[in-house]
Image: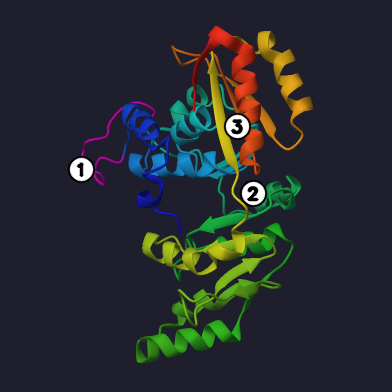
């Protein structure tokens, strides 16, 4: 699994970190009180910076966010990375929820569900959004033995299934707890009917539970990292290469050049992301693909065509 250290050498990491530090975080108790204000994001800005770099190197036109709070993290990710189609699920109960509308006004949120994410209504709504349209979905948390651990039930409902107790997981739990076993601990052996196990070296004996394209992971960060590390290789693909051109021109003025680049370089993808909050540029154009040379040529071609309107190329 990629870490902050892995991403720290990324060409955009320091820029992303400064952006995250500038907008701030609500989580002062976790991060020493040094991050406050701004968009009221709740994550460690260094982790957010690493995530931004990670997303920049991969296709990210669609984005699903479960737990949006005040919308600050979504706003920051969109400003740095750029999304084309966003789905949001949130209970609307966070103390910063009042900021959500302002923070997401320039984010292409196509679908939003405000309500209990563990409810049958949310499961039906998510099913109606055709969850299969997402290549891979990861869930985090809600898999313990207490009353609010309802992820298994929610995933089962999303697929029109039911929850069953799996004998293999039950045996693992009984062996682990021994005389300390409580009946409620066995709830962690309950899985959606039809789920399959994904085994990995990092967690011998304890599989990752998956329901079709949904991978169900624990919420405890240490366990989440360990579980993901055990299955990460199955998601590895040839890396995408990315170039970004920042320009003071408006989209309408450069649309014909973007059309030309799309027609001339069939192996690259071109995205255009206007911004209304950045003082030094109006549009960020992304050029990405698995052919590094083609990406470089297309970027050079576009930058030359836009001329003095180009602020910088990254």
Say which mark, if any, is on residue 288.
none
Report the Cα–Cα distance between label 3 and label 2. 44 Å
Q: Nearer the viewer, residue 196 or 234?
A: 234
Question: CB of mark 3 within 8 Å of CB of mark 2?
Answer: no
User: Is 170 on the left-hand or right-hand side of 159?
Assistant: left
Q: Residue at x 53, y 38 (%)?
A: 56
Q: Residue at x 34, y 42 (%)?
A: 46
Q: Position of residue 37 (x, y in %)?
A: 30, 27
User: Is 41 on the left-hand or right-hand side of 80?
Assistant: left
Q: Position of residue 255 (x, y in %)?
A: 71, 15
CA neighbours of label 2 inside 10 A, class few (<14), some (14 to 19), many (20+) = many
Question: CB of mark 2 within 8 Å of CB of mark 1?
Answer: no
Report the Cα–Cα distance between label 1 and label 3. 41 Å
**Discs 2/1, front:** 1
Q: Nearer the viewer, residue 9 or 115?
A: 9
Q: Position of residue 110 (x, y in %)?
A: 67, 32
Q: Mark 3 — residue?
A: 296
Q: Mark 2 — residue?
A: 122
Give the mark nearest the N terminus, 3 or 2. 2
CA neighbours of label 3 inside 10 A, class few (<14), some (14 to 19), many (20+) = some
Residue 60 visible in the shown view:
no
Give, as a single range, the part of the protein colored magenta. Answer: 27-39
Q: Mark 1 — residue?
A: 32
Residue 284 visible in the shown view:
yes
Callout 2 secondary element: helix
How many marks on residues? 3
Residue 221 shown in magenta: no
């Amino acid at each position: 699994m990629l870490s902050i250290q892995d991403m720290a050498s990324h060409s955009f990491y320091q820029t992303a970190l400064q952006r995250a530090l500038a907008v701030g975080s609500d989580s002062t108790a976790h991060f020493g009180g040094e991050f406050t204000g701004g968009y009221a994001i709740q994550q460690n800005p260094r982790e957010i910076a690493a995530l931004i770099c990670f997303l920049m190197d991969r296709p990210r036109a669609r984005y699903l966010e479960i737990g949006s709070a005040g919308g600050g993290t979504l706003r920051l990710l969109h400003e740095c990375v750029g999304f084309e189609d966003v789905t949001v699920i949130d209970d609307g109960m966070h103390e910063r929820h009042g900021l959500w509308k302002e923070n997401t006004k320039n984010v292409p949120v196509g679908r939003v569900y405000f309500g209990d994410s563990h409810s049958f209504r949310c499961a039906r709504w998510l099913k109606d959004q055709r969850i299969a349209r997402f290549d891979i979905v990861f869930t985090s948390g809600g898999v313990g033995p207490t009353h609010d651990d309802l992820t298994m039930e929610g995933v089962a409902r999303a697929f029109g299934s039911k929850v069953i107790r799996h004998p293999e997981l039950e045996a693992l739990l009984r062996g682990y707890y021994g005389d300390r076993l409580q009946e409620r601990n066995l709830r962690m052996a309950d899985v959606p009917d039809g789920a399959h196990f994904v085994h990995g070296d990092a967690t011998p004996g304890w599989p990752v539970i998956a329901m079709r394209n949904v991978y169900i992971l624990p919420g405890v960060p240490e366990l989440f990292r360990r579980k993901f590390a055990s299955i990460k290789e199955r998601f590895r693909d040839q890396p995408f290469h990315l170039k970004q051109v920042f320009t003071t021109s408006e989209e309408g003025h450069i649309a014909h050049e973007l059309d030309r680049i799309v027609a001339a370089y069939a192996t690259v993808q071109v995205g255009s992301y206007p911004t209304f909050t950045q003082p030094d540029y109006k549009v960020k154009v992304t050029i990405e693909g698995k052919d590094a040379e083609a990406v470089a040529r297309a970027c050079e071609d576009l930058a030359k065509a836009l001329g003095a309107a180009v602020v910088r190329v990254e």
